[in-house]
Amino acid sequence: MKVLTPYPGVIHVIYSEQTILAKAFMRMQEFYESAIPGFKGQQFTRDEFKKAYAEIMGTEEFTYYDDWGGFNVPGDVANKFMKLFTLDSMDEESLMKSIKQHAPWPPYKPFYVIGTFESGGDSIIDHELSHAFWHLHDDYREMMQGLVEGLPVRFRARLKRELGSMGYCEDVLDDETAAYLSTSSVLELDELVNRTDIPWKHALAFQRAFRDYLESKSSDSQ
Ligand SMILES: [Zn+2]
């Protein structure tokens, strides 16, 4: 496990394996944004979540550790999680320790935690960075929110439906819409909306806006 702080306020935890990444982040992620009733903002055990997830996915086996390869949690939620939960494994413990070590000082400064794994690819990192910028920077969020509002109504509704069925709660749908449209490949987008016609001009505007923002932040931090 490796920890980077690529931009101010962004703590990026990188794992060698997807399974360990997902084990470490799962409860904190679901505490933040679970769409499964009874988990968001609540205290729960790993077994309780495992059971509910398998039920909702309609699978006998628990597939979460293979289903998810990128994680994102706002700093204030990470802090609440640490106060409320008894950590249940070495994986959770070492993740929380790294967050504490890298969290900004003084403690009221906002930060954001993202988690990826080594062979996960750049598009996952960019996706999670989009979430971090959305939470940390008003100018990014306002720009992306504007692009989301400008999407054709039917496409936006379709995307919301798909994201909802993937397990995202209502509050994060615009944030996810921005992250998916600005950082996914053509194939990934096509798969996400099940070959509904994608308004490419709009998708391109998201991608350009993200690239430009990333570039401006990279030159800031040099
Ligand atoms: Zn996301």
Image: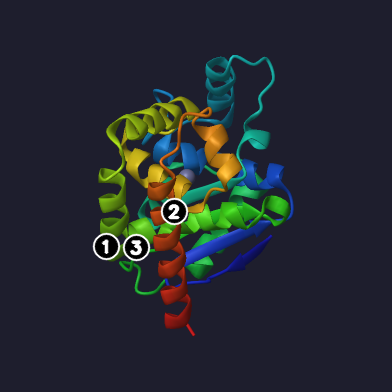
Exactly how many numbered labels are in the figure? 3
Instruction: Identify which residue, 86 or 30, lies in the foreground.
Output: 30
Q: Look at 30% across and 51% down and name the residue there.
A: 147
Q: Look at 42% across and 81% down and name the residue there.
A: 220
Residue 60 position, x and y percent, is 67, 14
Quote the CA–CA distance across marks 1 and 3: 7 Å
Decide: is 113 above or below 190.
below
Residue 187 position, x and y percent, is 60, 41
Quote the CA–CA distance across marks 1 and 2: 22 Å
- Work out whether mark 2 precedes mark 3 in sequence or the reverse, and give the earlier one: 3
The residue indicated by pointer 3 is 136
Numbered tag placed on residue 191 in the rendering: none
**Residue type pointed to by label 1:** Asp
The picture quadrant where one finds residue 212 is bottom left
Numbered tag placed on residue 138 in the rendering: 1
**Residue type pointed to by label 3:** Leu
